[in-house]
Structures are given as C-alpha cells and as structure tokens.
Amino acid sequence: MARYENLPIFRKAMELAVEVETAVRDFPRYHKYAIGADLRDLARHLYSLIIRVNSQADKVASLTELRDKSEEMKAMIVMAKEIKAFKGFKEFERLAISATEISRQSEGWLRNQKNSRPESQAPSGARERA
C-alpha cells in the first residue's frame, strides 16, 4: 500500500473534513441535515479518494474524479454561504480556502500524471529498428 499520510493534499483534506464537521455542528437545524450532511459526505469522499488515487498505478481517472469532486465541494461551500448556513464569514472563508487548495493540488497532480510517461513507452511515431 502506498504511503499517503505525508501528502500535502491528504493533510489538507483531513483539515477540510475536520473544519466541515465543526462548521456543520453550528448550522441551523434545517441546513445541518440538508446541505450540512452533503458537505460532510463530500469531505469524507474527498479524503477517501486521495487514499485510493495514491495506491493506484493509473491515477488519471481517479484524479479526474478527485478534481471534479473538489470543484463540487467549492460550489457547495459557496451555496451554503448564500443560504446563510454558516455562523460567520470566517467559517466560510476557512472552508473556501481549504477547498480551493485541494482543488489546485488535485489539478496539479492530474496535470503531472498526464504529462509523465513511463520510460518503457517510446514517443508515438518513433520506433526502434532492430
């Protein structure tokens, strides 16, 4: 199993999950069980996706899902702000910054995986002759 505990994106996802749990605890009752539950589920899903991505040989498909889910998380956080679910702006700001950092890191990781090629593959069109 690949080591994931020291990945910056993993630590940031853990931080986001804890921040979401803390913020949702203070949501009004209606929002706590509606958008709050969705935020909590999405934060846990991001966390588990990072573990899964890190253990796979071909990471591109899972990294694409991670990038999409992190964008969804950002949108959900903004929606929660718009419906005034957060206790204050500082809570929203902390969550938005964490979600943005995860999104940026996942995009960079995806770009890195798409640009890297195994050494065993020859560039297309260039074949060795025996």
Image (cartoon, rainbow, N blue to C red):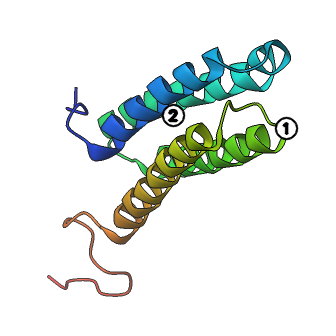
The residue lying at 19 percent from left, 85 percent from top is 129
Q: Which of marks 2 and 1 is nearer the N terminus?
A: 2
Q: How crowded is mark 2: few (under 14 residues within 10 Å), some or many (20 or more)?
A: many
What label sits on residue 83 in the rendered view? 1
Q: Which amino acid does label 2 sit on?
A: Leu
Contact flag, marks 2 and 1 (Cβ < 8 Å): no
Q: What element carries label 1?
A: loop
Q: In this view, does 40 lie above or below 29?
A: below
- Residue 68, x across and y down, in percent: 62, 49
Q: Please tell me in which quadrant of the rendered image residue 38 appears.
A: top right
Name the residue beneath numbered marker 2.
46
Count of numbered marks: 2
Q: Please tell me in which quadrant of the rendered image residue 119 appears.
A: bottom left
Q: Is residue 41 above or below residue 83?
A: above
The residue lying at 66 percent from left, 28 percent from top is 39
Q: Is residue 52 visible?
A: no
Q: What residue type is labelled 1?
A: Ile
Mark 2 and mark 1: span between their CA atoms?
23 Å
Tell me if 118 is positioned left or right of 92 in this view.
left
- Residue 71, x across and y down, in percent: 63, 51
- Residue 45, x across and y down, in percent: 55, 28
The residue lying at 20 percent from left, 37 percent from top is 6
Q: Which of 24 and 72 is in front in this view?
A: 24
